[in-house]
Amino acid sequence: MQHLFRAWESFSSDIRAASHILLLSDYDGTLTPIVGRPDEAILPSEVREKLCALAKKPAFRVGIISGRSLSEIKVMVGIDGIYYAGNHGLEIEGPGLKFINPGAKAAQTEIKELTRQFSAKLGTIEGVIVEDKGLSLSVHYRLVKESEQDMVAEVFHQIASPLLREGKIRVTSGKKVWEVRPPIDWHKG
């Protein structure tokens, strides 16, 4: 995929000619900067105002996609009448739409148990944040001392590996975070 600014000439011409536009954006690291703790990723008021203005235009549909839970991203953004996709698209809600991926719902027991195990084994380490998102979970280690990061990784993989081998979960990694999701072919895209 080309970066938007490299394709700006053709993109802007296509946008001007379009009768209907769906604008989807990620939240963390796109609408807000990457921060140390997930609760510090606050949507700037000027960004919220621009999204609201776009959402009011008849030709536009606006949506926010996030790895956060649907309920959390709706509160963080706080704009009525737009689409929200939480848990990497496992749950989607907006005008005339409410969806929860059935495969994700079926894996909730494993996700809940893993959340409990990660919290018990890693929750006492300064800087580790275990985030239960209902249909998925995240283990953040951005704030962990560098000298303890290998140990955190070892404990994480020790707990996750059996379910990973059995095909009961999927694990992806991001910017000093591991995402544990149901074993289904599903993502923000």
Image (cartoon, rainbow, N blue to C red):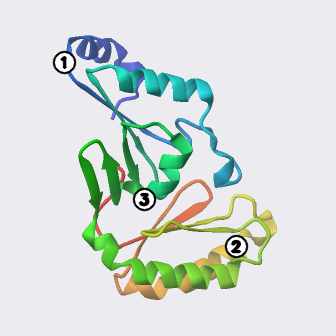
Q: Position of residue 19 (x, y in %)?
A: 19, 18
In terms of depth relative to the viewer, which is nearer, 64 or 164? 64
Task: Report which residue position mark 3 lands on.
Answer: 87
Graded by Cα atoms within 10 Å as few (under 14), some (14 to 19) or many (20 or more), the crowding at tag 2 reads few
- In the rendered view, tell whether residue 107 sits above or below residue 26: below
Amino acid tagged 2: Asp
Foreground residue among 99 and 155: 99
Whether residue 189 is visible to the viewer of this picture, yes or no, is no
Disc 3 marks which amino acid?
Answer: Asn
Query: What amino acid is at disc 1?
Result: Ser
Label 1 sits on residue: 19
Q: Which residue is mark 2?
A: 150
* Percent x, y of residue 36: 71, 51
Q: How many marks?
A: 3
Q: Looking at this view, is 119 or 178 the one in front? A: 119
Q: Secondary structure at mark 2?
A: helix
Q: Residue at x 28, y 72 (%)?
A: 103
Q: Quadrant of residue 105?
A: bottom left
